[in-house]
Image: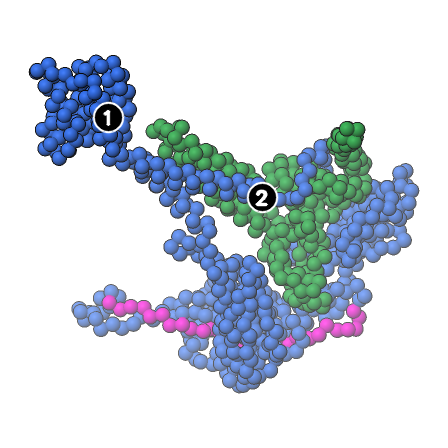
Chain colours: A green, B blue
Amino acid sequence: MIFFRVFLILIFTTFLVAPTYANSLFDQANEAFSKDNYAEAITLYEQLATEKGHSASLYFNIANSYAQLGENGKAVLNYERALRLAPNNADIIKNFSYFKKETGLFIEEQPTLDKLLNLLTPNQWSLLTLFFLVATSTTVILWKKLSSGSTPRAIATLSIFFTLTTVSSLASAQTYLSTASYVVINDQKLMVSPFKNAESKGLIKGGRTASVGKEYKTYIHIEGETGQQGWVEKKSLEPVIPE
Amino acid sequence: MTHFRIFLTLIVWILATTPCFAKDEPTIIAQLNTNSISVEKAALLTVTVTGSRSPDLIMPQVPGLTFHSRGTSTMINMVNGSFSKSSATKYVVQADQEGTYVIPPIAAEVKGKIYKSEPLSLIVTDNKAKSTGKAVSSDSKRNEIAFIELEIKGDHYVGEQVPVTIRGFFNERYKISLESVPALTGDGVIMAPFSQQPTQGRVRVGNRIYDVVDWKTTLSAIKEGEHKIQISLNAAVYTREQNNSNPFNDPFFDSFFNSNKKTPLEVSSNEIVFNALPLPKDGQPENYTGAIGDFSIHLEADPIIVDIGEPITITTTVTGKGSFDSVHAPVFVENKDWKTYKPSNLDVEQQDRNTKKIFQQVIIPRVDGIEEVPPITFSYFNPETKAYETSKSMPVAIHVKKSKTVENPTKTIVENKPEQNNQLKTESKVTKKKLYTNLVPQHLETGVFHSKIEPVFERTWFIVLVVICFLLILFFSTYHIYNHFKDTNPEKELKRKQKRLLDQNFPELDKLCENKQTDDFTNLAKDTVQQFYSIELNLPPQAITATTLEFNKLNNTVAKTILESADKIAFSGERPGPKQMEDWLKRLKEELTK
């Protein structure tokens, strides 16, 4: 019995202490940021991320710190991570757009269809689809109980909504999955082949997102968001979704 | 009707979702524009991959052949409602020496799978006379229709961007359409893409009038030596074809009955020698990074009043004419007074005839009392003067104050070394001035922590829930449809009605029989029989008599007996005894519930 009580107390204490520790570290980092000590702020934020996991606000703060340090690549990387967790967060969108504009990074003009898709985030589309799927299945299950002239009409309407949201969900998921998933950390030479002395095809700016292709030793073939292609060193890229 | 609606809904559903899963198998096709070239010419290799817009091409290594990538174009097609995507990557293929080459299958990686093209063969000849003979536009008839003029004066240096005007002359008497833009053939020289629309005019050459189209571009040698180059483009000449089908035999009607014939025409310039000289070694400055042209440099710094250890952003602008690809950032070199970071490219701007390339570099003063950011120099090779020149910016006046907070400014926070992947080092409490003042402030709450960055649609619970919902819909739809079919069967409906009738009347008959209420029993038994058979025969109950049953071959003896006895009771007063009632009821139950 005593053992059980000690166990309960330990569990309870853990739940109490864990958020306090996280908040304390977060506050310390914010304080360092407010004193323009961005490097220290980043160290504390990243320590928190390593220990507690991923949070949109945490990545947002890290991105702002890197932006103030002039580390464009790292700033973009962390804004992208924050957006993956909270795609509709107005603060993240505002700072990321402003930062891209200020640093001359590529801002893609979205086609109308994409604008429509972006009315909701991929997660919201998925949940909406799930809602209509559950609603349709519930109506089908309770057919007998609901038995009235309007039941088939209700099912038809729900099915149409479900179909529309499913199509939007799939398109949104496809866009999410095909979005460039790596960020170039520093300005890099794009090379025609994966060798040290290979001919350069031009520069890719630090902070540009890229999708990766085949690999050769320490080199990887990338396609930047502006369509530039070439080989760069693997270590010059970082994945948006941490491994 | 309800069933039809459900069926229609399911069909719409399936049709709407099916195309999302349709997928074509990718294919790869490699094609050469010619199977035979001379050593100093190039062939165009096009690799088309259908089913993917960004395949990873794995180009084979062929000793003696060089593949120069000329970019990728992508396309989306819609055929019969299904979408397909494709990409075409172009390579210029050049050979070092004559011979027959086999280009092995070109592989493309699409979504993790490897697809291969067919192998190609390319014959390379060393027949210079033959190749140059074709290129020289000595055909007088062709020259009369169209020709290209290109003039390159003097010698040029490797990497120098030589502005040229390609002039296409097209005889105004011919109806000519352009099928392509001018293309360069030849080794060792590359032509920049046309960034401007061509200009048009009209000139007289001899006694002919030509429409002239001018394309402005630049040529640049990629290796030294004498390179033979030629400019050509594809056009088509439309000539009127005489047609004997004019039934009126009058020239007035010729335009109605004659047709235009399109004849392909290759318009080429004379072969020109582009002499590319190597850059001189003598007098090359130490900080020369390969820029060729005529440039000037301008320096700005912000802020200009700082504490020790506070960063200053210097913006260096290189303006001028020349090859900006080879213009790299002029570097402010670190010294005892200044800590510096790696410069970065900020922007490239085009202004009239000049181009502007802007770089930024962060520098940090290490000592107080510094009064200026020293001038920055930029060296380049000027092909006009044929000498290396160095442009020097003006110094920028600044004021560096002693910092109250910084103890040791030489210990910095960020070591901006790309080789070390920009690892942050927190060695001191040096602060850095805000680069951006309009950012939304930091969040004060951490928010929810997630163990993984994963979208909802990839999470297990979501997938399981979707599958369960689909299975439930499938199961219950099938169940309801089955029941619906079962319930709407007319024969079963009649049986159900009859069963309801018997369930209602038999307990009543049992009671009457028990209480020996003969008249009531006989009447209810008669009603039961009449109603039972009226359902089956679709007749009014009054019409059911013993004769009706006999006529319809319903040989239910007890039913007939009951009907006859009921009539007898009405007319003669003869009543059945208790045993007979019990017997009738027993037989009636047996026969009607069969």
Q: Amino acid at mark 1?
A: Lys
- Residue in the image at 59% along x and 56% along y: A227
Q: Residues within 10 Å of mark 1 (few under 14, many from 20)?
A: few
In the rendered view, tell whether residue B130 sits above or below residue B350.
below
Query: Residue B308 sits in which quadrant?
Result: top right
Choose the circle earlier in sequence order: 2 or 1.
2
Q: Image check: A200 left or right of B137?
A: right
In the rendered view, tell whether residue B189 sits above or below residue B2.
below
Q: Secondary structure at mark 2?
A: helix
- Residue B194: percent from left, percent from top: 55, 62
Q: Residue A2 lies in magenta, yes or no?
A: no
In depth, the one of B570 and A144 nearer the eye is B570
Q: Image check: A33 left or right of B185?
A: right
Q: Image check: A79 left or right of A163?
A: right
In the rendered view, tell whether residue B402 sits above or below residue B219.
above
Query: Residue B1 sits in which quadrant?
Result: top left
- Residue in the image at 83% along x and 43% along y: B310
Q: Secondary structure at mark 1?
A: helix
Badge 2 vs badge 1, beta-carbon distance below 8 Å: no
- Residue in the image at 25% along x and 24% along y: B501
Question: Residue B586 shows which numbered tag?
Answer: 1
Image mark 2: chain: B
Residue that numbered label 2 is attached to: B460
Give the CA distance from mark 2 to mark 1.
64 Å
In depth, the one of B147 and B131 nearer the eye is B131
- Residue in the image at 66% along x and 61% along y: A220
Q: Which residues are magenta?
A: B257-284
